Amino acid sequence: EAGVAQSPRYKIIEKRQSVAFWCNPISGHATLYWYQQILGQGPKLLIQFQNNGVVDDSQLPKDRFSAERLKGVDSTLKIQPAKLEDSAVYLCASRLEGQGGGFFGPGTRLTVL
Amino acid sequence: AQSVAQPEDQVNVAEGNPLTVKCTYSVSGNPYLFWYVQYPNRGLQFLLKYITGDNLVKGSYGFEAEFNKSQTSFHLKKPSALVSDSALYFCAVRDPNFNKFYFGSGTKLNVKP
């Protein structure tokens, strides 16, 4: 079974630039999560989708972050404009209804200079 | 508020010795509890989970964890540590009502030969 795919794996941008990350969850997984993991910290949930609807985006900085999952499969997370403090690993995870845990992708490491 | 605490930033153990990585949680209702491991430049990998039933849960790579409701703990254990177990370990709790995951801050496990 293929895992959660994310791209790119690494991205370096300057502050005030824009960046987008892509996630392809495991086939059939209705729930999709985006997490931000700052170095030395545990992952923090940014947004949770159930199919193509947003379940929770309470910790998403909506003035600069946006995410979508138009067809209930792939998802993109965008930052516009980026700040230095956005430097982190952005993890995507998916979960099948009825399963306990989520499956995580390898993450995208973002460095904002 | 839901939360997960990992009181130790780092745990050092000699190869062949037993290891324990601690986790306590605060969540309303009956929690779903998880342990994940993260190797450098890799995504989070699922180790084990507790949903219901036997308090001692066995997972991947010889790890196990014990759910203790009275102490609200879910400590990760392994009878005999391997150098290859050295990694970052995250405890997580899922609120079954809202499917949200909350992660601890992580514990770095160092197993020395």
Image (spheres, helix red, strand yellow):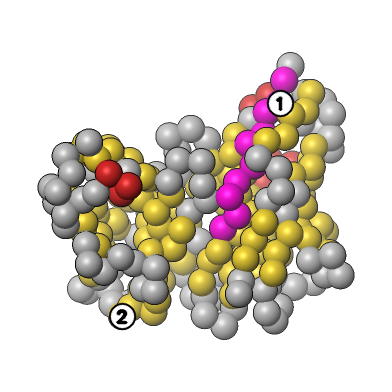
**Residue B57, located in which quarter of the rendered image?**
bottom right
Looking at the picture, does residue A76 appear above or below residue B79?
A: below
Mark 2 and mark 1: span between their CA atoms? 43 Å
Q: What residue type is labelled 2?
A: Gly
Looking at the rendered image, the quarter that the C terminus of chain B falls into is top right
Binning the other alpha carbons within 10 Å of mark 1 as few (below 14), some (14 to 19) or many (20 upward) gives many
Percent of width and height locating residue A103 = 48, 56
Q: Nearer the viewer, residue A83 or B36?
A: A83
Element type at mark 2: strand
Magenta residues (range):
B103-112
Q: Which amino acid does label 1 sit on?
A: Val
Q: Which of A66 and A75 is in front in this view?
A: A66
Badge 2 and badge 1 in a common chain = no
Tell me which residue sits at (55%, 64%) in the image: B102
Q: Which chain carries label 1?
A: B
Q: Are marks 2 and 1 in contact (CB under 8 Å)?
A: no
- Is residue A21 rendered magenta in the image? no
Residue under label 2: A53
Looking at the picture, does residue B112 appear above or below residue B74?
A: above
Looking at the picture, does residue B72 appear above or below residue A35?
A: below
**Residue A29, located in which quarter of the rendered image?**
bottom left
User: In the visual, does B85 lie left or right of B46?
Assistant: right
Looking at the rendered image, the quarter that the N terminus of chain B falls into is bottom right
- Is residue B109 rendered magenta in the image? yes
Q: Nearer the viewer, residue B97 or B64?
A: B97
User: In the visual, does A89 lie left or right of A12?
Assistant: right
Residue under label 1: B111
